[in-house]
Image (cartoon, grey):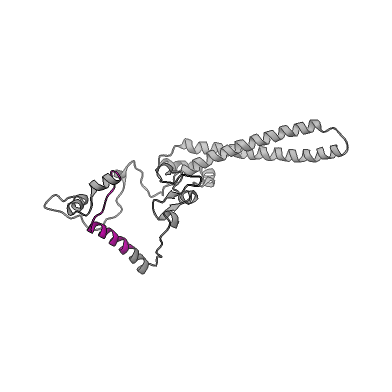
Amino acid sequence: MFDARLLRSQPDAVKAALGRRGVSGEVIDKFLALDEKRRELIKAGDELKHERNVASEQIAKVKKAGGDIAAEQARMREVGDRIKAIEKDFEQIDIDTKAILETMPNMPHESVPDGASADDNLEVRHWGQPRTYSFKPKPHWEVAEGLGIIDFERASKLSGSRFILSRGLGATLERALINFMIDLHVTQHGYEETLPPYLVNRDTMYGTGQLPKFEEDLFKTSGATPFYLIPTAEVPLT
């Protein structure tokens, strides 16, 4: 969630930075207006509560002395209603400001170039030179299909487009690459192998930035306490 303190203290800097990511300045202005209203409600509520406390003490003294407290009690009921209204408004503002902060992206580093698409990316460095061929090379998916190690047609029948079914040496190759990566990092780079749960609770997804942004794209169970299917092991490990 975006840091509200940064937004309060450096609104112009945040506007300039997030404007580079397509965030409208009106969103930031809306947050600042809500935040100002929030502070006003806190002040008004504290003043009314103080007034009620003072009046309660006075009512107790008058009642003990046998005086008439009906009018003051009626006034305090009105004060109580006003406090409840302020608390209701405060609760709604909290919801609205949190919704804004949850959906605001991170500020880009000053070294990141502006751009509307990948065509605007800058090449920082490269290694080696692309090979040249005397023929038109096939893309990897055609090579894999020709070798019979990936079956796109059956994958499409099972799950739909953009899924693959690895077969034979294709499945063996994928498993070997997974084992190679894990063994390399565990034995040579000091990592600990972990097999986390594939389903996690909402707090875990929220704490790693998956929610609320990807709410509609995530698979989850139904029920009072839903569990979410993790997109990667990054979520439970974090």
**232 w.r.t. 58: above or below:** below
**137 w.r.t. 81: above or below:** below
- Does 194 lie within the magenta span? no
At a point 60% along the width and 38% down the height, the residue shown is: 90
**Extreme residue toward the right, this view:** 65
Residue 162 in sight in this render:
no
Which of the two residues, 51 or 84, is positioned nearer the viewer here?
A: 84
Q: How many labels does the image show?
A: 0
Q: What stretch is highlighted in magenta?
A: 159-181
Horizontally, is 41 left or right of 184 in the view? right
**Extreme residue toward the left, this view:** 134
**Extreme residue toward the bottom, this view:** 187
**97 w.r.t. 198: above or below:** above
Horizontally, is 143 left or right of 116 in the view? left
- Does 173 lie within the magenta span? yes
* Residue 6 pos. (x, y %): 52, 46
The quarter in which the C terminus is drawn is: bottom left
Residue 231 in sight in this render:
yes
- State which quadrant residue 191 falls in: bottom left
Which of the two residues, 2 or 166, is positioned nearer the viewer here?
A: 166
* Residue 226 pos. (x, y %): 47, 47
* Residue 154 pos. (x, y %): 24, 47
At a point 49% along the width and 40% down the height, the residue shown is: 100
* Residue 218 pos. (x, y %): 41, 45
